[in-house]
Image (cartoon, grey):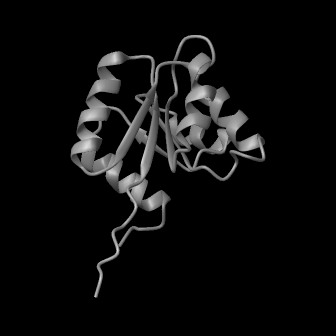
Amino acid sequence: MKKVLAKKLNLLVVDDDDDMLVLFYMAMRAKGYDVEVSRNAETFWEDLFYTHPDVIILDVHMPGIDGRVLCRRLKEHEYTAQIPVILLSANADLEHIASETGANGYIKKPFTPEKVMQEVDRIMGKAA
C-alpha cells in the first residue's frame, strides 16, 4: 500500500523587518512548512499571486501600507477572501485589530515557532 504524503503548507510572511523574516523562514522551514517572504506592501501583491499561499502572516505595523490595510483588502477581494490571514504584532489591542480587519487569527510578539504552528493548525482546522 502506498503512503500518501501530506501537502506541505505554504506560508507567505509579510514583514518589513529583515531579521524577523530570516527568523520566520528558518524556523518554519525547519518545522516542515514551505515559506515565502515579502518585505512590504509594494511587493506583496506580486508575491501573493506568484506563491499561492495557504496562509498569510502579516505584520501589523509596517511603513506605508500596513498589515491592517492589507488584511482588509485581502478579505474584500473575491480571489483572496478565502486565504486565511494571521496578524503578527506586539500591539496590546491585537485581538481587536484582528477582529476589525477580518483576520482569521493573530500571534502576539514575542512568539515561538510552536505558537505559530499552533495558530496555523487552528486556522487550517487541524487542531486536536
Is 125 on the left or on the right of 114, as rendered? right
Q: Quadrant of the N terminus?
A: bottom left
Which quadrant would residue 126 be assigned to in this image? bottom left
How far across and down, in percent of the image, does residue 57 sit?
A: 48, 38
Q: Is residue 52 left or right of residue 7?
A: right
Quarter containing the C terminus: bottom left
Q: Residue furthest top?
A: 63
Tell me, yes or no, if residue 112 can be seen here.
no
Q: Residue furthest bottom?
A: 1
Q: Find residue 49 and report its image quarter.
A: top right
Question: Eyeballing the image, is 118 above or below 50?
Answer: below
- Whole-percent x, y for residue 75 in the image: 71, 43
Nearer to the camera, 109 or 49: 49
Q: Residue 43, percent across and down?
A: 57, 20
Identified at 44% across, 47% down, the residue is 10
Q: Which sits in the foreground, 126 or 68?
A: 126
At 36% across and 45% down in the image, what residue appears? Answer: 34
- 24 sits to left or right of 49: left
The residue that appears at 45% across and 17% down in the rendered structure is 16
